[in-house]
């Protein structure tokens, strides 16, 4: 049995849930294991109804009013009970801020292996070999799990294509009785949207985005000049914002804005997966980076492998000349 | 407040990474090692909490001379003392074995009110070890933390977590607690010359697997939950068109292609 821990927010399944189901459906074909989607919440009927139409074998729900908001203490407590009873072969969890929050505790509570941040897998004989990215996606590492199942794996958002999901199922929905012990350690006080500010990039047709390759704050003027010449908006990768070269509202990626302009220029951005998930839906992606191995070239349509400090001023000049003409 | 700050030595981010002959890791003999970037934010946060609430900051690291080096720079930044987990038996630890070892060391040191670690390391980058340590110790925890405040009762914390899509979640945790600190929570300080001089006089303990009472199969490669089959350069699936020529020529060709081929301008 392969478990997929469904992630949801309010009344919607999150995209990672479909990605995990795609991962599970492929594994299911290769390893002959049935799939159970596991869903924790306070009112699971509607979403369980949506899950059961996917090509899976079972939906297992655990309902309790304390599960309205995600809480790691409760997730570990309930999932541990379910897994001890059902002993699945593999438990798939999203490598999201939620999955990263409870998966390590759950694996340690059960003293079982966890491979975090998986992007692919292979079947080696009867063994499952999981691939993940290391050194900020510069290298991959293939790992084999030790000991007996259940095994745990988290999948990187964006690694499995959600649109490959197979539907046409009519899975049984069964509910797991929830008995909670004591009080949860973590109390959720509130969730608020961080200030959006002026830089709403969601509808920008052209985005010129700069990264760590710009080396210093004052060099970011190159990005602003090019953006002005081309008539686009400015964006940035996480390190730029962390170094306080630009305010947080410019950040593109999993913890910032998700954008899909017709043209996205990634300048001096190496392309960590957290950045890629925020921009890979762009129609045309251009990468300018002196490191030919940078992962950004994996998603780019056009690339220039050269010194951005030479290429960007040349580009700006062309657009300025075009404007004048 | 006693705060443990976990620091992992990783190759300097500017290093050229070469895969070793066994294809199980990188050739790391000749590389310069520094503290993993997120761990610097965690240490800075630990120092700020101590400045506000009193107590002590203990830096802990596991590894060889590289770990000793990041511990010395932690002391120079302002940590009060250091614990170096040093033993050939620790070599080859995965996240699980590292967390086992860290938890034993923290227990031996009398526990802590707060354990801080970076949200993820620059090498394995999975963000698991800190939270695994919390489970081994039975501490509360929170991940991807962008703000920490101690409550007036000095027994609990208010913590801000950064979720996807710019959502901030405020949670309350009892102490002891383990937090994984997100990049950008603060601006880490540099060590002053005075700090570097003072660091030389600070307590620096070295503990082995035997000191921690760890069985041979509980740490290092023997205590790992998975086996590294192969480290490799990722395949490039993309059909990126690389534009060559001098910077001026490449820029001109690119503009031409964006206008006529991609038709996005």
Image: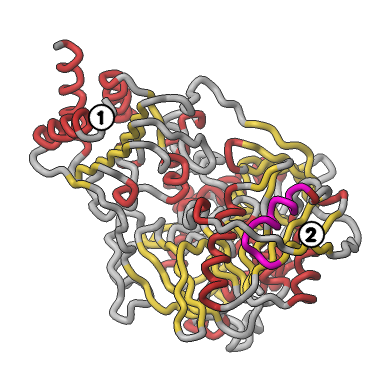
The image quadrant that residue A23 belongs to is: bottom right
Residue B265 percent across, percent down from the top left: 26, 25
- B18 left or right, relative to A33: left
Q: Which residue is mark 2?
A: A61
Q: Nearer the viewer, residue A81 or B156?
A: A81
Q: Chain of mark 2?
A: A
Do we see residue A181 in this rendering?
A: yes
Residue at image location 88% in from the left, 56% down from the top: A183
Q: Which mark is residue B263?
A: 1
Residue at image location 52% in from the left, 37% down from the top: A256
Residue at image location 69% in from the left, 33% down from the top: A192
Compared with residue A67, is residue A189 higher up or lower down, i.e. above or below? above
Compared with residue B112, is residue B146 higher up or lower down, i.e. above or below? above
Q: Secondary structure at mark 2?
A: strand
Residue B133 percent across, percent down from the top left: 66, 66
**How far apart, in angstroms, are the residues tagged by discs 2 and 1?**
49 Å
Report the span colored magenta: A46-57
How crowded pointer 2 is (Cα within 10 Å; few <14, some 14-19, many 20+) is rated as: many
- A12 left or right, relative to B10: right
Q: Is residue A50 magenta?
A: yes
How crowded pointer 1 is (Cα within 10 Å; few <14, some 14-19, many 20+) is rated as: few
Residue B27 percent across, percent down from the top left: 31, 72
Q: Nearer the viewer, residue B41 or A238?
A: A238
Q: Which mark is residue B59?
A: none
Residue at image location 77% in from the left, 47% down from the top: A46
Disc 2 with disc 1 on a shared chain: no
């Amino acid at each position: 049995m392969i478990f997929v821990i469904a992630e949801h927010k309010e009344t919607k399944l999150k995209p990672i849930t479909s990605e995990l189901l795609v991962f599970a459906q492929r594994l299911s074909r290769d390893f002959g294991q049935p799939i159970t989607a596991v869903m924790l919440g306070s009112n699971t009927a509607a979403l369980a109804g949506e899950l059961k139409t996917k090509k899976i074998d079972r939906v297992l729900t655990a309902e309790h009013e304390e599960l309205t908001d995600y809480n790691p203490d409760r997730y570990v407590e309930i999932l541990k009970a379910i897994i001890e009873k059902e002993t699945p072969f593999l438990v798939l969890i999203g490598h999201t801020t939620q999955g990263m929050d409870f998966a390590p505790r759950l694996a340690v509570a059960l003293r079982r292996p966890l491979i975090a941040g998986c992007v692919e897998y292979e079947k080696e004989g009867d063994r499952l070999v999981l691939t993940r990215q290391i050194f900020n996606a510069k290298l991959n590492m293939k790992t084999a799990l030790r000991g007996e199942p259940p095994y745990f794996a988290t999948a990187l958002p964006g690694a499995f294509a959600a649109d490959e999901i197979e539907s046409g199922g009519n899975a049984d929905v069964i509910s797991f009785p929830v008995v909670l012990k004591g009080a949860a350690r973590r109390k959720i006080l509130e969730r608020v949207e961080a200030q959006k500010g002026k830089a709403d990039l969601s509808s920008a047709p052209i985005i010129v985005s700069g990264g760590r390759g710009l080396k210093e704050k004052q060099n970011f003027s190159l990005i602003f000049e090019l953006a002005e010449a081309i008539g686009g908006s400015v964006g940035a990768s996480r390190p730029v914002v962390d170094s306080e070269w630009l305010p947080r509202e410019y950040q593109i990626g999993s913890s910032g804005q998700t954008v899909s302009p017709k043209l996205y220029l990634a300048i001096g951005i190496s392309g960590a997966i957290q950045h890629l998930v925020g921009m890979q839906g762009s129609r045309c992606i251009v990468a300018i980076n002196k490191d030919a191995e940078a992962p950004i070239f994996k998603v780019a349509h056009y690339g220039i492998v050269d010194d951005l400090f030479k290429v960007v001023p040349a580009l700006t000049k062309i657009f300025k000349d075009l404007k004048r003409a | 407040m006693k705060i443990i700050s976990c620091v992992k030595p990783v190759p300097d981010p500017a290093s050229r990474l070469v895969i070793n002959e066994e294809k199980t890791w990188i050739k790391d003999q000749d590389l310069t090692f520094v503290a993993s970037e997120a761990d610097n934010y965690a240490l800075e946060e630990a120092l700020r909490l101590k400045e506000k609430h009193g107590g002590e900051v203990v830096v802990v690291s596991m590894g060889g001379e590289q770990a000793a080096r990041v511990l010395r720079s932690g002391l120079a930044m302002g940590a009060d003392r250091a614990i170096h987990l040093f033993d050939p038996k620790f070599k080859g630890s995965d996240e699980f074995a590292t967390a086992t070892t860290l938890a034993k060391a923290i227990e031996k040191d009398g526990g802590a009110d707060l354990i801080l670690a970076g949200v993820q390391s620059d090498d394995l980058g999975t963000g698991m070890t800190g939270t695994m340590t919390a489970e081994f110790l039975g501490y509360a925890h929170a991940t991807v933390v962008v703000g920490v405040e101690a409550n007036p009762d000095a027994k609990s914390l208010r913590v801000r977590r950064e979720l996807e899509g710019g959502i901030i979640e405020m949670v309350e945790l009892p102490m002891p607690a383990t937090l994984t600190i997100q990049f950008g929570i603060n601006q880490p300080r540099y060590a002053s010359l005075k700090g570097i001089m003072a660091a030389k006089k600070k307590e620096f303990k070295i503990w082995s697997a035997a000191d921690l009472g760890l069985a041979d199969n509980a740490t290092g490669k023997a205590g790992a939950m998975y086996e590294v089959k192969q480290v490799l350069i990722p395949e490039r699936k993309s059909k990126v068109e690389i534009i060559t020529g001098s910077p001026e020529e490449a820029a001109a060709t690119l503009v031409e292609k964006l206008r006529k081929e991609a038709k996005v301008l």
